[in-house]
Structure formats: structure tokens, C-alpha cells
Image: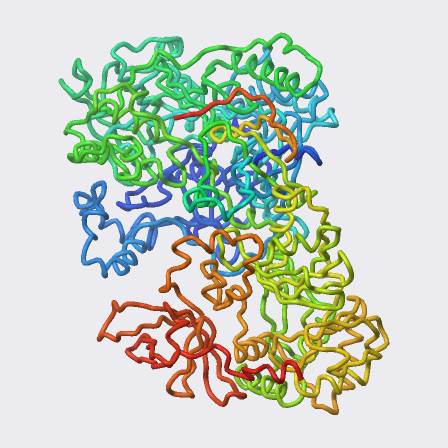
């Protein structure tokens, strides 16, 4: 059970949150101009990094705000949380093979 | 009922408090402080059950959580507990325990015939033998499950209740032995909030079984003084009978506290067990170590136990496991047990020591005490099936792989065996800490913690008592400091002995008279009946990875999770493959450390509290009216209202007809409602719905279709424009939560620039839908709103009063008939409903439930999201492409242009009329165009809704059929189990009032 630092509420247990996949994937402003491949990539593919990962969470049973988290997906170490409009914190990124 | 093997001069049981219990129906006596195992041993009983696969007679091997053999059924009836370790079950008055996997009993067990065929049951036996014919597996499985297995689960409801508690602490200490107590002490002195838990009723751990001193006084005095000091710290919580069984991410720890299992009379007001879920800032693991048995021939005979267990029975429980003991060891430390036993008056017949030279501090003391030591000896054979009678010792050859020279038979009535020690690294491993193999002690020890935890004492490979105390004091101080408390310093360590168990010789298989696998069995995993021969066979058959060997042989996979067997198995595989143990690999330990009852997992979340229920304000009325309910999300919705003994079918036919003939009333409170406000509200609606919203004026309402970004239909409902920049969105009853989350996500993450505010207002309203030709006449009697078609056209709403209370009335229809949906404040819901019911009497108003609602909407070809759609259906598939605006972007639009979405052979929404108008198709039935005599046939679709309609006078259905939009008039068939086939014609899905005249009346 992860302990997740909601930027609005503070540290709360994982079961108050819902996961939202990879962060910083921007919905194309004009989807109709995007190729099928690029759209499929936006829709279905995520980096799913084994290591430092920037991901979205929502405090579903709390403030209901979306925010981003930097988490090591292997060790579950949390490097920090930041609001949607904020820049990610500087983190020594790790990728495991 | 004499306890022949009870020692009067030692042990911690209370000789003043005798306790009577039964074992397999026979009465015995023990004392307060006994476990079932110690009480049985006091009565001279070693044979307690039969093994899992071979039904071998089995005795008591251990004295704690490690016990693989002595699993008993405690009590009978609804409170019965299967597979309880006799070594941990506290004895109470009137306790009734029985053997498992033995019929009629462990002495004369019918299943023991399996032993005669043991040659036929090698590793992988099931996989090899029961491969074919495939169809027969369910039969084989039944027989195997009956023959193998352990205890019986209760079949009656659990009479006990269970509790769950959440807690936070600064330092959690797992284990209350010397290291754990010392750690708790220094952590507590710093002022930290400490939780100290131990599985035993008494704290002290190994000290309870030892005769050592601390600072010159009996160790137990130090335990007492430490506990006294801890109890003086208000921030310390001491939990006896509490096992730390799970270690999860971010120091989330699960504990199981046993509250009444040890009581003779279970109080009604106390939970049987309590599960603690603790978030600890820092953790100290002080979980001790478990002795390994030696793998020699027939090492599972009753009477053969771990040396540490024998020592524990003598010192802690005051019980002699027998009168004449043979020690079999590969290390020096085991002689400590022999010395304690000798001191208690047990004759040590001999010590068979596999070491080439028997040396070491305890060995020397044993020699001085006159114990006969046979160095460089192995076990040639063991005599006695139901109780060891003698053991045959024979010198080892130089390579240790076989025996040589003259053997001698040594009579005994029990054997103490020691193969070294395994630090209890289970919790550390669960925390995903990395293990390191320590070659000197041939054991896995903690290497690197990945969480805020540290190990102290034996569980990290510190073997002497003084070392354990020192470890604990330091770990507690360090943990408190790391949690932000003042550095208390560990302080000086009390004086105690500091002996380990080395030197040792790592002979993973002790050779016998015959090669391994011939005549007799070298057991590695007692609980799953895995032998050294099984492991060797697996290797011969090509299994090299330890994970594969484990799964093929099932070693280490029983309920004890290999507590005594894992390292022995690794050692044997390592020896056979000629590779060092670290290269063989380690195994991962998973929670729970010991089995946890389902009751504890459920806690209070059972019965009425299992899940939340949502009720509409009219719920009490529905209950009084005798409604049958169905679950829609968390809502309880009236399903139908049977009159008298009416069947569901009859009630639904009556309700459907009455509504179309006069007027029906439906509780529609459960519809999701989201209040949408803000200057950009209409732009937002435009983006989340497929259709356009800019032309919707205040007072008007519109049906909207919502897609996921993948283009699949997600929800639908009517949204009304209340006033400029203010809308009320309706969602499906079950989808309200998901829709709100979906909208919030886009608003926060993709379009934060939109000034839109969403509020869920589902609970604020109560809604009644009046439907049928008399709906207007009825409603007009109780409202000041002008209901005439000119003043109040279809797809608009009006505000006024209904039944004297403020109301918003929508002229929308899900029934396909003239319909008004009346919304009032939730508090007025019941009043509104009752008023409509009493005024409606003259129109024979009929309350109808969700089933009739389904029939009526299906007659009209209206979809239900989740019934006609399943997350793979697009608006194009539904024939609703006209609802998809070409003038704007909306969520899911781009996906509708993907090539797969344009495939004309996608499953599309159609109506179905069975050729036989009395035949009601089964929902979910598969449809084919070309019939064959037997499956497989090409399936072209499925039935999504199917009913008998009194209004159509026949059966009908809705379905999704490949290319169905262009197949109206064609035949499809529904082949049913049993050979029956239902022929149907594909039609337009609108069966009733296709022109919408009634709707707009």
C-alpha cells in the first residue's frame, strides 16, 4: 500500500487514489489532423518504464484533483508529486533493464 | 491421565492449573501455558497425523511457527479451524483437537496404502499420469483431492466476529525476543510511538526456551524488567499473540492479533481476531531464526524432532520428548540442547555428528558431561514406523557421499536433529530487501533494505545472545533517530553469553545404507511430502532453475512455505548440479508468514456491512408495496411489484400493459445528475458529447451520447439547459460516478482553461416518471404547470409545483409513451410519490420496476448502455451516426475514423423477431447465419435484450449482428444447448410507435 503525497492534501494511502497512466501525454489539439498511427500511439501506447516514471494520479476519495507523481516503478520509491500545471522535480532518473 | 513425561522442576507452565482436553476423542490433561503439542508430548504422544501424499505417520517436528507436520483440526462445527499448528495452539479447558488426513485415525489410516505404491508417486506424478484423456481430469481431481489434503474447512456460517484496526507508529518492532525487546526499549526511551508485536502469548522469544543468564540473573528477569519499563511508556503498544505476517510497500505492515482463540469460553463481545494495518515510519525486524532438520533416511518418523524444539519442550514447557535421545547434528550448537536435556534427566544415548571432527565449545562441554559422540557418522537407517525405536549409525566415507565400515544400532525413543539455522528473513524478503548467502553459516541473511527497515539479532545472522541484545539496542536507537527522535544512544549491552552454533559441516544429504531414493525416504519438505530423490529426479528431467524445481516437485509450496525446507532443497540442488548455492538462486517469500483466516481479512465488512447500499427517498414505500429489488450500481431499485403470488413474468406483463393502456409510475431517482455551470459550460458539453449543444435554449433538453476517447459508447442521457451557462446533465444510474470522473479528468488535465464547474447533485433530487396515455390527465390534477402539448412540448422542462412542493418537470420519455419526469427535492420525494399514487387511483396507476422499464424501452428500440453496449460498440454500430456532429471535435471522434471502425462487418444494432412468437430468446444467445449439425459454427452476433411484450403480443429481442444494419429481413438462428434452434428475422429495432406519435402526444 503506497503512501502517496497528494500536493493538495498531503500524504495519504494508495486506496484513496486512482491511477491515470503516463503523465505528460498531451491530447492532440486537432485530432482529425493526426495520422492513424499517431492517434493509436496516443490512445493505446504508454512508455511503461521499468524505473523512474512520470505518471498521473487522482485523489479520487479525497480532493478529487489530478496531479503527477514521479515514482520508481521497480522499487516504488516516490521521488515527488507536483500539480498538473507545474514542472516535474529534478530527479536522477533510473531505468532498469 | 498421568503426564508421564512432565518434568516437575522446570518449565513455565502452571502446575497449579491443570487443563483437560481431548485428542481424537480421548481425554488428556495438560497445564496452563501448554501448547497442544507440549501437552501431547507430556502424555507421551508423538504420532499426531498422516502426511499429505503418502499418508506417512507423522509426529511433532518443531515448537513454533515452523511446524510442518503437526497440523490439527481444532474443535468441530461452525468454529472448527483446520490445519492449526499444534506447536502454536494454546491449550484451553475442554479443547477438542483431531488429526487431519487420517481416517479412521493416525494409528490405523486406510490411506496409508499409498505408501505401498510410493514408487508410483514421484515428482510430477500428477502431470505425467493424468494427462489424458483430458475429459477425465475432473474425475481424477476428485479422487486425488479426497486422497490427498489436510484439514476440513467449516461449512456453517462463522459464529465469531472479527475486527480491523488501522494504526500509525514511529517504530514497529516485529518479534519480542531478546533483540526485539532491546530494540523496543531504546526506541521507547527516545519518546517514539512504538508497536511491539510477538506471536507468542509471552514475550521473550528464544529466552523462554533457554537457561541463559543476562547480567548474571536468569534471562527471564531481564525480559520482565524490560516489559515493565516498556509498559511505563505511554506511547508504547505491546501486542502479544500478534503475528506480523505481511510487509508491503512504504512500511505498510499487516498484523494478526488473536483475541479469543486461547480462551475456553469465547466472550460474545470480543472479536475472535483483529487485523492491524500499521503504517510505520521505521521498522525493526527481530524475527529470530528457525532450525533446519537434517536430511537423512526416514527422517520423518514420529519422535524425530528439531534439537531446538526438544530444548524448548524441556526448558519452556517442562516436558521430556522421551527418555532416551539420540542427537543427530552437523553443528556445535545442537549440543546445547543435548546438555539441557541431560540436565533434565534425559539419557543422551549418543550424538551422531556428521562433522569429520566434533569440536566447538558446546561439543567440548558435552564430552565433559559424558555424552558419547560419534564424529564423522551418518544415519544408516531408522527403526520404527509410528515411533522411532532405534537409529543405526555408520561412519561416513571420506567424501561424505556414502557410508562405510561397521554400523551400530542405538536404541532410543526420540531423536533431536539439527542441520544449522535459517535466519527468519521472510518479512525482510517480503519488504523486497535483498538477501545475501552467507557461506559460513550456509544461510540467507539480509543484505540491503529497500524500505526504512533494519534487522536485528538472529534474523540478520547474529547468533550469540549478547550480540542479539547489542543488535537490538542499536537498531531501536537507530530507528527512533531515523524517525526524528533524539539520539538516545544504544547504551551498554547487558552481559550475556555470546556463542554461535558453528563450527558446522554442510552435508545437505546425509547418506544412508542405500542410495537416495532406494528403501526409505529422505524428506526435505515434510508438509508436501517432497524427498531428496524427488529433487534429484527433477534435475535429471532437466529442471535447472530452482523456481522450476520448486513448482515441479512442490517443495516449499505448502502452508509452511518451506520454513524448514527451503535451504535444504537449495543445498541438495546445488550439490547435485555442482554449483554454489548463490548461483542456484533464492526463493521469494510472500505474505502471509503464517496462514490468516478469511474472517480476519473480512473483518467487519460482512453481512449488511459488506457493501454500501443506496436507497431512494421512496424506498420504504417500495418495500411496503412488496417490490422485488435489483442492484444497479450500489442502488437497490424496484425490479417489479408482484401482486399476491404473481410470478416475475406475470407481474412484468401486467405492468407493461397497464402503463401503455393507462398510466404507470417509475422511481427514476437513481439517474445520475451532474450540475454543470460556468461561462464555458456549453463549449464543454460540445466536447464531451457527440452531438451539438450551442442551439439548446433555456427550458429545453436534449439527448446526448458520450464516448470514451477510443470511440466506444460510454454513457447516455438527457441534459437540460436550466439557464444561460447552467446545465443539468443526467447520466445512467450505474455510470454516474464514472462519468463525473471522466469529465473532471478532461477538465483538469486537458482543458484547464475552460471555466466549468461540476457538482454531483444525484442525491439532491427524487424523481418519479409518469408514463402512459393518462399521464397528462393525472399530473394536471396536482400541478400548476400548464401541461398542454402546445405549452409544454416534448424535450422541454417546466418549473412549478407538484403536490404542493417545488418541482421541475421534464417532458422526456424512456418508455416511448407520453411521459413526464417529475423532480422534487429529495425530502419531498415520498410525499410526491404518495400523492401521485392516491390521485392516480382513478386511472388505475401502476407502479412499475426496472424490468418493465426495460421492456418498454426495448419495444421502442432505446438502448441501455451496458446492455446493448459493452465497451466495443460505437455510435455507428448503433445506427446513431446522425448524433455525431461533423462540425466539431468531441471525445472519441478521431477514433471513429480509424479503419477498424469503418468496417461494414462490425456488429451492428438490430431488432429480432423469433419465428415462433411465444419463444423468448435467451439474452447472450449466439447467432449464426449458417446452421451446422454441431459446433463450431460461425457466430455472427448475439442477443443483447429479449422479452415477451404484451403490447406487441409476441416475443422480440434486440441484438448485435455483423453488418446487421443492412440485413433487415434476413434470417439468423440461435442454436441452443440441447440441439434446439430458434429461427429469427432481423428487423428494425423500433417495434412500437415508430412514428413517435405517442411520445409527442
Most extreme residue toward the right is B804
The colour scheme used here is rainbow
Does residue B590 appear left or right of residue B253 in this picture?
left
Counting from the top left corner in percent of width and height, residue B823 is at 75, 70
User: Considering depth in this image, is B656 or B624 the residue closer to the camera?
Assistant: B656
| Residue at 64% in and 18% down | B482
Q: Is residue B900 above or below residue B193?
A: below
Q: Is residue B369 above or below residue B234?
A: above
Q: Is residue B303 visible?
A: yes
Find residue B61 and report its image quarter: top left
| Residue at 23% in and 18% down | B377
User: Considering depth in this image, is B263 or B41 the residue closer to the camera?
Assistant: B263
Does residue B388 appear left or right of residue B662 in this picture?
left
Counting from the top left corner in percent of width and height, residue B523 is at 27, 34
Q: Is residue B274 above or below residue A89?
A: below
| Residue at 23% in and 61% down | B135
Amino acid at each position: 500500500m503506497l503512501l502517496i503525497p497528494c500536493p493538495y492534501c498531503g500524504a495519504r494511502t494508495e486506496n484513496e487514489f486512482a491511477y491515470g497512466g503516463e503523465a505528460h501525454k498531451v491530447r492532440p489539439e486537432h485530432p482529425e489532423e493526426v495520422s492513424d498511427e499517431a492517434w493509436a500511439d496516443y490512445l493505446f501506447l504508454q512508455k511503461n518504464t521499468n524505473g523512474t516514471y512520470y505518471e498521473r494520479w487522482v485523489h479520487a476519495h479525497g480532493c478529487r484533483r489530478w496531479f503527477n507523481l514521479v515514482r520508481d516503478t521497480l522499487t516504488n520509491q516516490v521521488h515527488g508529486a507536483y500539480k498538473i500545471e507545474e514542472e516535474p522535480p529534478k530527479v536522477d532518473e533510473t531505468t532498469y533493464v | 491421565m498421568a503426564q508421564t513425561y512432565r518434568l516437575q522442576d522446570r518449565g513455565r507452565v502452571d502446575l497449579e492449573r491443570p487443563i483437560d482436553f481431548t485428542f481424537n476423542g480421548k481425554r488428556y490433561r495438560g497445564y496452563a501455558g501448554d501448547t497442544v503439542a507440549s501437552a501431547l508430548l507430556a502424555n507421551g504422544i508423538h504420532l499426531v497425523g498422516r502426511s499429505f501424499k503418502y499418508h506417512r505417520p507423522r509426529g511433532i517436528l518443531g515448537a513454533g511457527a515452523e511446524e510442518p507436520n503437526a497440523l490439527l483440526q481444532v474443535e468441530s462445527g461452525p468454529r472448527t479451524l483446520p490445519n492449526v499448528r499444534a506447536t502454536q495452539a494454546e491449550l484451553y479447558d475442554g479443547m477438542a483437537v483431531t488429526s487431519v488426513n487420517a481416517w479412521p485415525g493416525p494409528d490405523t489410516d486406510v490411506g496409508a496404502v499409498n505408501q505401498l505404491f510410493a514408487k508410483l508417486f514421484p515428482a510430477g506424478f500428477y502431470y505425467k499420469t493424468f494427462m489424458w484423456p483430458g475429459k477425465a481430469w475432473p474425475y481424477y481431481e476428485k479422487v486425488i483431492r479426497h486422497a490427498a489434503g489436510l484439514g476440513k474447512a467449516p461449512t456453517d456460517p462463522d459464529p465469531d466476529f472479527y475486527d480491523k484496526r488501522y494504526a500509525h507508529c514511529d517504530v514497529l518492532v516485529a518479534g519480542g525476543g531478546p533483540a526485539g525487546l532491546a530494540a523496543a526499549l531504546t526506541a521507547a526511551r527516545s519518546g517514539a510511538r512504538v508497536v511491539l508485536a510477538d506471536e507468542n502469548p509471552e514475550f521473550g522469544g528464544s529466552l523462554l526456551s533457554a537457561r541463559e543468564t543476562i547480567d548474571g540473573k536468569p534471562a527471564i528477569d531481564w525480559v520482565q524488567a524490560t516489559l515493565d519499563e516498556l509498559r511505563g511508556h505511554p506511547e508504547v503498544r505491546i501486542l502479544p499473540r500478534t503475528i506480523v505476517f505481511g510487509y508491503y510497500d512504504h512500511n505498510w505492515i499487516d498484523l494478526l492479533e488473536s483475541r479469543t482463540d486461547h480462551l475456553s469460553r469465547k466472550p460474545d463481545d470480543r472479536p475472535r481476531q483483529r487485523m492491524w494495518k500499521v503504517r510505520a515510519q521505521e521498522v525493526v525486524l527481530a524475527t529470530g531464526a528457525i532450525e533446519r532438520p537434517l536430511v537423512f533416511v526416514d527422517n520423518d518418523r514420529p519422535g524425530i524432532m528439531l534439537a531446538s524444539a526438544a530444548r524448548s519442550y524441556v526448558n519452556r514447557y517442562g516436558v521430556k520428548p522421551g527418555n532416551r535421545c539420540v542427537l543427530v547434528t552437523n553443528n556445535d550448537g545442537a549440543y546445547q540442547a543435548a546438555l539441557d536435556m541431560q540436565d533434565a534427566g534425559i539419557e543422551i544415548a549418543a550424538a551422531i555428528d556428521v562433522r569429520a571432527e566434533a569440536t566447538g565449545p558446546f561439543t567440548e562441554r558435552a564430552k565433559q558431561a559424558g555424552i558419547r559422540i560419534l564424529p564423522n557418522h551418518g544415519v544408516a537407517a531408522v527403526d520404527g514406523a509410528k515411533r522411532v525405536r532405534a537409529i543405526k549409525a555408520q561412519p561416513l566415507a571420506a567424501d561424505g557421499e556414502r557410508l562405510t565400515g561397521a554400523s551400530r544400532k542405538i536404541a532410543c525413543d526420540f531423536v533431536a536433529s539439527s542441520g544449522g539455522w535459517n535466519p527468519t528473513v521472510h518479512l525482510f524478503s517480503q519488504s523486497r530487501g535483498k538477501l545475501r548467502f552467507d557461506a559460513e553459516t550456509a544461510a540467507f541473511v539480509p543484505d540491503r533494505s529497500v524500505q526504512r527497515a533494519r534487522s536485528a539479532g538472529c534474523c540478520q545472522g547474529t547468533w550469540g545472545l549478547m550480540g542479539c541484545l547489542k543488535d537490538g539496542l542499536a537498531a531501536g536507537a537507530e530507528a527512533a533517530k531515523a524517525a526524528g527522535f533524539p539520539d538516545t544512544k544504544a547504551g551498554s549491552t547487558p552481559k550475556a553469553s555470546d556463542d554461535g552454533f558453528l563450527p558446522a559441516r554442510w552435508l545437505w544429504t546425509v547418506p544412508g545404507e542405500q542410495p537416495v531414493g532406494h528403501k526409505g525416504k529422505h524428506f526435505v519438505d515434510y508438509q508436501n511430502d517432497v524427498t531428496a530423490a524427488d529433487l534429484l529426479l527433477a534435475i535429471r528431467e532437466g529442471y535447472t532453475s530452482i523456481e522450476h524445481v520448486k513448482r515441479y516437485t512442490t517443495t516449499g509450496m505448502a502452508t509452511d512455505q518451506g520454513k524448514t525446507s527451503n535451504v535444504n532443497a537449495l543445498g541438495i540442488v546445488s550439490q547435485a548440479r555442482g554449483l554454489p548455492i548463490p548461483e542456484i538462486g533464492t526463493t521469494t517469500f510472500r505474505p502471509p508468514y503464517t496462514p490468516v483466516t478469511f474472517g480476519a481479512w473480512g473483518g467487519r465488512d460482512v453481512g449488511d456491512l459488506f457493501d454500501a447500499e443506496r436507497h431512494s427517498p421512496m424506498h420504504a414505500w417500495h418495500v411496503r408495496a412488496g417490490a422485488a429489488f435489483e442492484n444497479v450500481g450500489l442502488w437497490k431499485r424496484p425490479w417489479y411489484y408482484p401482486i399476491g403470488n404473481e410470478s416475475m413474468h406475470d407481474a412484468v406483463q401486467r405492468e407493461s400493459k397497464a402503463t401503455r393502456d393507462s398510466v404507470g409510475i417509475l422511481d427514476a431517482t437513481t439517474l445520475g445528475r451532474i450540475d454543470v455551470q460556468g461561462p464555458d459550460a456549453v463549449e464543454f458539453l460540445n466536447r464531451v458529447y457527440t452531438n451539438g449543444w450551442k442551439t439548446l435554449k433555456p427550458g429545453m433538453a436534449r439527448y446526448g451520447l458520450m464516448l470514451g476517447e477510443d470511440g466506444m459508447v460510454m454513457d447516455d442521457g438527457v441534459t437540460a439547459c436550466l439557464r444561460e451557462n447552467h446545465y443539468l446533465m443526467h447520466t445512467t444510474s450505474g455510470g454516474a460516478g464514472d462519468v463525473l470522473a471522466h469529465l473532471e479528468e478532461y477538465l483538469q488535465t486537458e482543458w484547464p482553461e475552460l471555466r466549468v464547474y461540476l457538482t454531483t447533485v444525484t442525491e439532491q433530487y427524487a424523481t418519479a416518471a409518469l408514463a402512459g396515455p393518462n399521464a397528462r390527465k393525472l399530473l394536471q390534477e396536482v400541478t400548476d404547470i400548464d401541461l398542454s402539448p402546445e405549452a409544454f412540448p416534448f424535450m422541454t422542462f417546466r418549473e412549478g409545483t407538484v403536490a404542493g412542493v417545488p418541482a421541475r418537470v421534464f417532458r422526456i420519455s424512456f418508455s416511448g409513451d407520453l411521459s413526464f419526469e417529475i423532480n422534487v427535492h429529495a425530502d419531498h420525494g415520498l410525499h410526491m410519490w404518495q400523492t401521485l399514487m392516491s390521485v392516480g387511483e382513478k386511472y388505475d396507476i401502476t407502479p412499475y420496476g426496472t424490468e418493465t422499464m426495460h421492456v418498454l424501452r426495448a419495444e421502442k428500440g432505446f438502448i441501455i448502455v451496458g446492455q446493448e453496449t459493452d465497451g466495443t460498440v460505437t455510435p455507428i454500430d448503433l445506427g446513431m451516426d446522425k448524433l455525431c456532429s461533423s462540425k466539431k471535435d468531441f471525445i472519441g471522434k478521431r477514433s471513429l475514423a480509424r479503419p477498424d471502425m469503418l468496417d461494414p462487418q462490425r456488429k451492428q444494432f438490430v431488432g429480432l423477431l423469433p419465428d415462433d412468437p411465444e419463444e423468448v430468446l435467451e439474452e447472450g444467445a449466439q447467432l449464426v447465419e449458417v446452421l451446422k449439425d454441431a459446433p463450431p459454427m460461425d457466430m455472427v452476433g448475439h442477443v443483447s435484450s429479449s422479452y415477451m411484450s404484451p403490447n406487441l403480443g409476441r416475443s422480440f429481442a434486440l441484438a448485435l449482428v455483423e453488418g446487421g444494419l443492412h440485413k433487415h429481413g434476413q434470417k439468423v438462428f440461435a442454436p441452443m444447448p440441447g440441439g434446439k434452434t430458434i429461427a429469427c428475422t432481423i428487423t428494425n429495432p423500433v417495434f412500437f410507435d415508430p412514428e413517435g406519435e405517442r411520445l409527442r402526444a
